[in-house]
Image (tube, grey):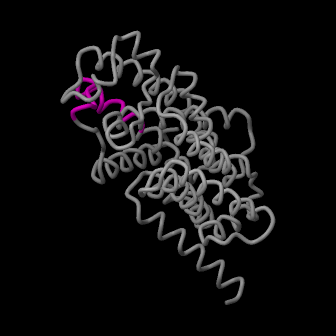
Amino acid sequence: MTAAASDAGARAHAEEIARGHDENFPVAFMLAPRDVRADIRAIYAYCRVTDDIGDAGDATRDGRVAMLDAWEDDLLRCWGGAPNDPVLLALKGVVRRRGLDAEPFRALIEANRMDQRISRWQTHDDLIEYCRHSAIPVGRMVLGVLGIDDPRCEHLSDATCAGLQLVNFWQDIRRDLDERDRVYLPTEDMAIFGVTVDDLREHQASPAVRELIRMEVWRARALLIEGAPLRAEVPRRVRPDIAMFTSGGLWVCDAIARQGFDTITRRPAPGKSGRARMAGAVLVGAVRGVR
């Protein structure tokens, strides 16, 4: 097989992974130039596989750490050598074309290592530090593909990504506890509201749990609003896509509020139809010149 054929096969494999997950990330950037869209999907495939190593399957925590270490070793071949995994081979092409740094990619692996070591978070600041390894690097990867190297844009991207990560946590409080024994609600905040882990296992949220979630959702919303001006700083063809991320996060904040800040009973999610409506609203705004 020629190098060109191998690279094409790797890109096709990354595309398949991106299209095979019903999430916002691969659905976005539909209006972006084809090369940008392909590179974003290669990055998504990398992020998806990294998170699957950290979460999916029946491996032990030690086993996951070993797999993450091996994954990082193969990742580093993107900056010198030939990766073995086809997802990383596709990523190597993106790294070469865009001149991307290894740090955000390694940070995402470290976030998954943190998940093996830590299942409770003491403070909100600790949780934001986790976001600096998990969600924030993904935004930096996207900025790299777009050729943006600007402190203001990085700050806005960081706020947006942290807000999205937090609102995802508050969607999945019960699932994270039941499936992974993880509680992302800071223990310091739980103590303030008199909430225990056992309260999170009840059939519905108590008034104290609702007030705690209300505060955490407010924090996530504030970050999303802080980061919203990013859409005016990126190339015109990707502005609707960036707006979609903010709109999606704010939709979840509103959905949590509509159900009385009880995400213990039911997980709010827009689904395909909800995402389609959000996309339509963003596109209408773009046509009307909303910035």
Residue 202 image offset from top left, x and y in percent = 22, 27
- Examine the image and state in which quarter residue 233 appears: top right
Is residue 127 in the magenta section?
A: no
Is residue 266 placed above or below 215 in the rendered structure? below
Residue 221 image offset from top left, x and y in percent = 44, 26
Q: How many marks?
A: 0
Is residue 208 placed above or below 165 in the rendered structure? above
Q: Residue at x 59, y 47 (%)?
A: 138
Front-lying residue, 208 or 158: 208
Q: Residue at x 73, y 47 (%)?
A: 103
Is residue 235 placed above or below 77 in the rendered structure? above
Quadrant placement of the N terminus: bottom right
Report if residue 228 is visible in the image.
no
Residue most extreme to the left = 203
Front-lying residue, 171 or 58: 58
- Examine the image and state in which quarter residue 45 appears: bottom right
287 lies left or right of 273 = right
Please provide the residue range marked out in magenta: 249-265
Residue 154 image offset from top left, x and y in percent = 67, 37
Residue most extreme to the right = 80
28 lies left or right of 181 = right
Residue 24 image offset from top left, x and y in percent = 43, 51
- Examine the image and state in which quarter residue 282 appears: top left
Report if residue 258 is visible in the image.
yes
Residue most extreme to the bottom = 1
